[in-house]
Structures are given as structure tokens and as C-alpha cells.
């Protein structure tokens, strides 16, 4: 039986609460998570069953069904993220799974195209996901846009920082100062996810109960930094540490120092794409870097109309000739018209844009470049885009500097 005939026996439907058991069963089978694994992590049987209920309640989930049996699925979270101080609607992808016996016939490809179309209709011009397979998602148009740097510090390497006048206070996860502090941070940080209640649920979903939060308050009573951490078997584990100014950073490290009799080393993750070693007096620490989040521009026209390009000193035009093997609406030429402080966009169905400055590139390369993960000069050097030297100079001028901070997982 050929693929088309086989798929005609199946149908795509949107999942609801009644599909919770099948949804969880497929996820756990595909990712080989047993009930014993979850119980060992401290989850009760009922908690395991309800762990992903928020997806069905707050997200849009689609699946292929063989009669009444769910065989392939994908979930779309409605989210927002900061791209160079411009807030974008973002579609977060999760819950991607297919039973192995149904793989290889294009079920997931169809589901991906369906949710990308829904994102476009909803104005979600960018999509992010945590990849289980980088090659697979690259083939669907996603590309790496941020890294996770894990580090380990000996207790003797904890930095000696100037003493500050503020205080640290431990708080609960629903503390308003904590939530407001992250929101302020996200509004000023390129790449950061703006966390709504659903995002916060995902942030805490797989954490143990005794994880702690501590805020730094300055002498005026304003919270300017926080640390989310866990003390476990003589290890101080840092989940996330952010600060709005250097005073808060100093205050947090003093707080860590105060626990020095309780740990032998510090382990943590850094999502700023900057090495922690440079900030330490003894920078001879262990750090490892790995790709973390992938992103995809869903609708190039929508995305470019909102993108905060830097202006340049002279009036000119620049053309992106985009290649997208999945979404036909992106296979066009997009002409930016720079006039004074204004940037206008023309969209041409023909890829013959006729401008002096242009670049031909894939949707993956356009995404990673505009989110700042790799600069135009580097992408040209590795032959990820086709442009002459003068066009690269224009790109370097109009694309803002800075790599994305993305610490969330969903």
C-alpha cells in the first residue's frame, strides 16, 4: 500500500481534554519515559497523569488518528518573545511525537505545516522549540539561535565581589516582586521569553519541591536580581541567575558565599552566550557549550515589517531573496527601502529584485542572522548566504548586535 492510500485511512483532528491519556501515553512511549522514572523523580501517579494537562487546556494540539487511536501529535503554545526590544508573538512547539510504526509516511511533516499555517494566521511570525534532533528540525526550516553554557566552580573559586548595602530574601514562586523582576528583565533582554502563567508552569514543571528562590533588594526596597537554586549533596545548583545591575550581581554572589560551608562546588547554566570565566578572579573553571533553542521565521513579511533594523547614513534599498522548502509564501524577494529614519518593505513574487545590494539565503540562515546568533560576515564565509562585500557591509550595519538570552524549556 502506498503512502497516499495509507494516509487516506487516517485523519487529522484537534485534541481536547478527552485525549489526555492518549497524549501522555504517546509522549512517554516516544521519549522512553517510564512511570518508574517519573515516580523516582518525586511524581505521584495522578501528578504524572496530569503533568501535561496544561498543554491541552492552554495550547492547540493536533494529531493524526488511526480510527480513534492517536498515532502522531504536535502542540502549539501561544507565546511572546523579545527581539531587540520589540515584542513578537511566538509559536512554541512541543509535544512532538509519532509511534515508530507510523513513521516515514509524512505524518509529522503534515502536522508541522498545519501548525505553521495556524501561526501565520495568528500573527506568530516566529517559532521556537527545544530540538530532539537538530538535523530534523533544520530540514523543516528551524535553526539554532541560542546556546546553553553549563559550568562547574570549586568552592575556592567563588568570586570575591565588593560588599553591597542591599539584602537577599528568599521568596515563593508566586511572589509578585519575583514575577515582576523577571518581566522587567525580559522586556529589556533580546531573546527572552515573556512568561505568562503557562510559561511559568512549564518553567517549574519538572523541578523538585525544595528548589529555592532568593531576591536581591537594594536600599530603596527595589528587587534588582534573583537566583533560583538547589542545595543537593554538597552541590550548589543554579537553575537561573539574573540581575538588572552590577550591585544585584554582587549581592547574589555574596548570598552564594554565605552558603560556602554547605557545598563543595557550584554547578549551573548560563544562557547569556557569554563565558562566566571572565567574571571570576580564578577563571580556570569547567564550562561546556551546547546548542539550546532553535527558531524559525514563519512569515518573512510579517517578521520583517516588525523587525527593528538599524538605520544607515544614506538612502538605499536592500533585498533578501529567501528560499524556504516548506512554506511557499516565504519564497519571494523582500526589498527594504531605507529613507532617513524610516524603513519600508516591498514584497516581490519574482526573485529578480533588481537592487544593488542583496543576499540570497535560506529561511534557516535568515532566522539565525536576524536573531543575532551568527553575523552576516561569518555566514558568508561559510557559504550560508550569497552576497557581495558591499551587501555584507550593509547587512552588518542594519542588523542589531547581541545574542539571544533564552533560558526556558517547554
Image (tube, rainbow, N blue to C red):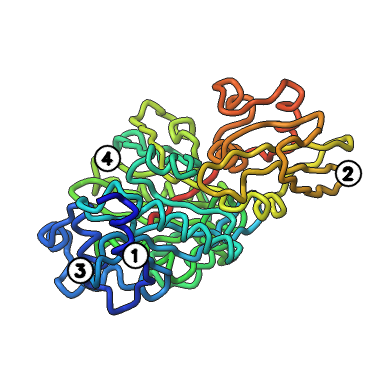
Disc sitting over residue 230 in the figure: none
Vertical comparison of 353 with 59: above or below: above
User: Is residue 403 visible to the viewer in this orientation of the structure?
Assistant: no
Q: Residues within 10 Å of mark 2 (few under 14, many from 20)?
A: some
Q: Residues within 10 Å of mark 1 (few under 14, many from 20)?
A: many
Disc 2 target residue = 339
Q: Mark 1 and mark 4: span between their CA atoms?
A: 45 Å
Residue at position x 80%, y 41% from top? 311
Q: Mark 2 and mark 3: span between their CA atoms?
A: 57 Å
Q: Which quadrant of the rendered structure holds the C terminus?
A: bottom left
Q: Mark 1 and mark 2: span between their CA atoms?
A: 47 Å
User: Is residue 36 visible to the viewer in this orientation of the structure?
Assistant: yes
Mark 2 vs 4, N-terminal side: 4
Disc sitting over residue 63 in the figure: 1
- Label 3: element kind: helix
Disc 4 target residue = 265
Amino acid at each position: 500500500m502506498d503512502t497516499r492510500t495509507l494516509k487516506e485511512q487516517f485523519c487529522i483532528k484537534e485534541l481536547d481534554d478527552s485525549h489526555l491519556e492518549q497524549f501522555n501515553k504517546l509522549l512517554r512511549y516516544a521519549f522512553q519515559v517510564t512511570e518508574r522514572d517519573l515516580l523516582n523523580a518525586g511524581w505521584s501517579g495522578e501528578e504524572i497523569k496530569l503533568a501535561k494537562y496544561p498543554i491541552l487546556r492552554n495550547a492547540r494540539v493536533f494529531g493524526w488518528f488511526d480510527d480513534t487511536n492517536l498515532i502522531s501529535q504536535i502542540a502549539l503554545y501561544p507565546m511572546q518573545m523579545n527581539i531587540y526590544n520589540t515584542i513578537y508573538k511566538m509559536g512554541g512547539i512541543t509535544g512532538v511525537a509519532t509511534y515508530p510504526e507510523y513513521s516515514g509516511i509524512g505524518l509529522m511533516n503534515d502536522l508541522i505545516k498545519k501548525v505553521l499555517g495556524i501561526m501565520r494566521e495568528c500573527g506568530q511570525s516566529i517559532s521556537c522549540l527545544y530540538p530532539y534532533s537538530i538535523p530534523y528540525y533544520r530540514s523543516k526550516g528551524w535553526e539554532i539561535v541560542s546556546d546553553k553554557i553549563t559550568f562547574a566552580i570549586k568552592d575556592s573559586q567563588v568570586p570575591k565581589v565588593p560588599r553591597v548595602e542591599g539584602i537577599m530574601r528568599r521568596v515563593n514562586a508566586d511572589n509578585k516582586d519575583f514575577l515582576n523582576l523577571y518581566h522587567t528583565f525580559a522586556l529589556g533582554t533580546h531573546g527572552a521569553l515573556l512568561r505568562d502563567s503557562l510559561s511559568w508552569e512549564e518553567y517549574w514543571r519538572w523541578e523538585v519541591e525544595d528548589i529555592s528562590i532568593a531576591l536581591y533588594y537594594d536600599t530603596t526596597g527595589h528587587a534588582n536580581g534573583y537566583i533560583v537554586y538547589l542545595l543537593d549533596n554538597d552541590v550548589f545548583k543554579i537553575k537561573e541567575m539574573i540581575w538588572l545591575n552590577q550591585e544585584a550581581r554582587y549581592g547574589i554572589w555574596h548570598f552564594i558565599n554565605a552558603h560556602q560551608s554547605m557545598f563543595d562546588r557550584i554547578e549551573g547554566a548560563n544562557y547569556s552566550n557569554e563565558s562566566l570565566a571572565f567574571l571570576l578572579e580564578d577563571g580556570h573553571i569547567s564550562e561546556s557549550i551546547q546548542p539550546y533553542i532553535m527558531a524559525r521565521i514563519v512569515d518573512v513579511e510579517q517578521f520583517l515589517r516588525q523587525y527593528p533594523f538599524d538605520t544607515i547614513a544614506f538612502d538605499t534599498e536592500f533585498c533578501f531573496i529567501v528560499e524556504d522548502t516548506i512554506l511557499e509564501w516565504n519564497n519571494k524577494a523582500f526589498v527594504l527601502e531605507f529613507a532617513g529614519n524610516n524603513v519600508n518593505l516591498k514584497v516581490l513574487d519574482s526573485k529578480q529584485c533588481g537592487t544593488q545590494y542583496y543576499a540570497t539565503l535560506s529561511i534557516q540562515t535568515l532566522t539565525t542572522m536576524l536573531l543575532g546568533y551568527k553575523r552576516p560576515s561569518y555566514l558568508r564565509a561559510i557559504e550560508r548566504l550569497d552576497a557581495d562585500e558591499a551587501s555584507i557591509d550593509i547587512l552588518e550595519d542594519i542588523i542589531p548586535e547581541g545574542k539571544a538570552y533564552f533560558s526556558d524549556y517547554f
